[in-house]
């Protein structure tokens, strides 16, 4: 069997000299090429017009009824053994808040201001106060919104002259986060949260300030963001050190347009003046901390720069199938764990080429995720988690790879077939895919990291690119802290207002205490606030 189609159709003279087996091989190679192109076309159609979800719907069981079919009535009442179906818990549907009915509050009453409006009763119109009695009240809640508002804090400092000594004194202005800046810490924190958590570019924030009657320049906002992020950089580095010190690290990479190409270079002649492509290399630690370091390329050397070459014995690197991670793990002696979600994705993409085979693979991988769901529901950890995986997941993994070997023994699978590529992808990574079976600290996939790095593509859709590589580095610093705040249930605004006031006075040797995970333990119960907070509370 030929592995690739001939580069051109044979001429009439050559065609006459071909034997029947050669013609059959030629037709089969053409058929394989057509299937590969059809698979590519289907993929592009799905990216443009179809849903991006990888939810798997198995083929219907032919023994089961289909939608619209009626069950045939039995001639006699059916009798037989019965079983009791255990009760299950149903989620209580929330009532429609838009109706404004009497409901329990749907907000945190300690944080959300409530304005009370008294509704008069038309039945008491014209009656004196002694002609009726209020025997109770009912409350209804509606969610309202004020336009974004800004406040100017005016610090009035008296100039005092002592009558006895004639000495004149005046208290100094309160020290701000940035010396001599007009920005209060609340504006600094709000600027970063709006841009990086809610993806509101600075030019839109500038428009909002102008609409509120505040005249500042856009470069001032840019400089303000840069100066504030520079204060946060030591905290980001401390968090990255904590991740690197962990035993299990998950890692990935995602592209970002950052920095303009230099005119005249040979590599840039096709796209003069365009944006260069750099990469964030997100790393996720075992204590639910994530950082987004930026590097200008996807080269393997950046993995070594980021994680270092001296690793603790017993360390595990969890990643997708990119060869740079395997090479780094081999060089450092780390255990390289592979992601089952990426393996599953290969079979998902192969459904159009081989629906039956790909469906069987997806069903078997789904059984592994069912075991993981049982572990989460039972809250198993440590040795109990490892034993549960060995008992339930390991036999399934062995059956899956035995099934893969049987698929390779079939006839008619071309190397270019997406299903064949998916089989090869899984077989080549078997050792890494089995790491999670014996190590309870290793997740089955990198989905936790994929969820954490959603902030990057979400931002890309709003600001599209970073004008400089320094800007991309700053994006990584702030997103590292904000996303980690989300992972630990911390309000990013409250966190930033606090640490921006602490970082200049906190001992450098204890800067790790200002990372979100440790800040929650040390300072979250009594965070530092802006002066604006005291005014609002009063």
Image (cartoon, rainbow, N blue to C red):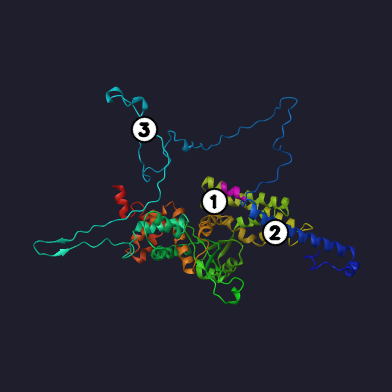
Q: Give the number of the disc on residue 119.
A: 3
In the rendered structure, which segment of residues is drawn in magenta? Answer: 368-373
Residue 482: percent from left, percent from top: 44, 57
Disc 3: CA contacts within 10 A as few (<14), some (14-19) or many (>=20): few
Which label's residue is closer to the chain start, 2 or 3? 2
Residue 145 in view, yes or no: yes
- Distance from label 1 to label 2 (Cα)? 41 Å
Q: Quadrant of residue 64?
A: top right
Front label number (1 vs 2): 2
User: Are the two marked residues, 3 and 1, in contact with CB atoms closer than 8 angstroms?
Assistant: no
Is the residue 11 above or below the residue 83 in the image?
A: below
Front label number (2 vs 3): 3
**Image quadrant occupied by the N terminus:** bottom right
Residue 437: percent from left, percent from top: 59, 55
Q: Please say whether residue 370 is one of the residues in the magenta stretch.
A: yes
Disc 2: CA contacts within 10 A as few (<14), some (14-19) or many (>=20): some
Q: Give the number of the disc on residue 40.
A: 2
Residue hosting label 1:
385
Assign a secondary structure to mark 3: loop
Assign a secondary structure to mark 2: helix
Residue 311 in view, yes or no: no
């Amino acid at each position: 069997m030929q592995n690739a189609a001939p580069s051109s159709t044979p001429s009439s003279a050559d065609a006459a000299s071909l034997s029947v087996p050669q013609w059959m091989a030629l037709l089969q190679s053409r058929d394989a090429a057509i299937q590969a192109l059809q698979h590519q076309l289907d993929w592009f159609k799905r990216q443009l017009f179809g849903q991006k979800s990888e939810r798997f719907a198995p083929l219907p069981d032919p023994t089961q009824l289909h939608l619209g079919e009626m069950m045939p009535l039995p001639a006699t009442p059916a009798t037989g053994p019965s079983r009791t179906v255990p009760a299950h818990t149903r989620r209580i549907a929330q009532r429609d808040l838009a109706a404004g009915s009497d409901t329990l509050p749907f907000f945190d009453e300690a944080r959300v201001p409530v304005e009370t409006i008294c509704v008069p009763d038309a039945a008491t119109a014209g009656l004196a106060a002694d002609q009726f009695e209020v025997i109770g009240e009912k409350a209804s809640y509606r969610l309202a919104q004020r336009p974004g508002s800004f406040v100017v804090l005016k610090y009035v400092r008296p100039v005092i002259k002592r009558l006895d000594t004639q000495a004149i004194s005046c208290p100094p202005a309160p020290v701000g986060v940035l010396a001599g800046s007009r920005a209060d810490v609340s504006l600094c924190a709000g600027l970063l949260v709006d841009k990086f958590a809610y993806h509101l570019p600075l030019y839109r924030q500038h428009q909002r300030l102008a609409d509120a009657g505040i005249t500042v320049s856009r470069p001032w906002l840019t400089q303000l963001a840069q100066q504030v992020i520079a204060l946060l950089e030591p905290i980001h580095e401390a968090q990255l050190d904590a991740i690197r010190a962990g035993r299990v690290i998950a890692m990935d990479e995602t592209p970002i347009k950052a920095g303009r190409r230099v005119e005249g270079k040979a590599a840039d002649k096709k796209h003069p003046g365009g944006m260069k492509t750099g990469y964030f290399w997100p790393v996720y630690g075992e204590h639910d901390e994530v950082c987004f370091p930026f590097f200008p390329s996807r080269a393997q050397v950046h993995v070594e720069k980021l994680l270092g070459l001296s690793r603790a014995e017993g360390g595990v690197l969890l990643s997708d199938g990119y060869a740079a991670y395997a090479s780094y793990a081999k060089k450092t002696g780390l255990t390289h764990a592979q992601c089952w979600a990426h393996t599953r994705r290969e079979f998902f993409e192969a459904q159009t080429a081989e629906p039956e085979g790909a469906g069987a693979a997806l069903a078997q991988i789904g059984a592994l995720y069912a075991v993981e769901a049982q572990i989460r529901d039972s809250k198993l950890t440590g040795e109990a988690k490892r034993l549960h995986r060995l008992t339930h997941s390991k036999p399934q993994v062995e059956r899956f790879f035995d099934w893969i070997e049987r698929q390779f023994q079939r006839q008619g699978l071309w190397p270019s077939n997406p299903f064949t590529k998916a089989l090869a992808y899984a077989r080549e990574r078997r050792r890494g895919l089995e790491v999670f079976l014996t190590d309870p600290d290793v997740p089955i996939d990198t989905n936790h990291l994929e969820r954490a790095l959603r902030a990057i593509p979400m931002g890309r859709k709003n600001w599209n690119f970073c004008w400089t590589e320094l800007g991309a580095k700053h994006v990584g610093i702030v997103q590292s802290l904000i996303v980690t705040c989300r992972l630990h249930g911390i309000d990013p605004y409250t966190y930033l207002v606090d640490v921006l006031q602490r970082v200049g006075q906190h001992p450098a040797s204890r800067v790790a205490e200002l990372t979100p995970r440790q800040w929650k333990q040390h300072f979250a119960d009594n965070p530092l606030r802006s002066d604006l907070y005291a005014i609002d509370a009063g």
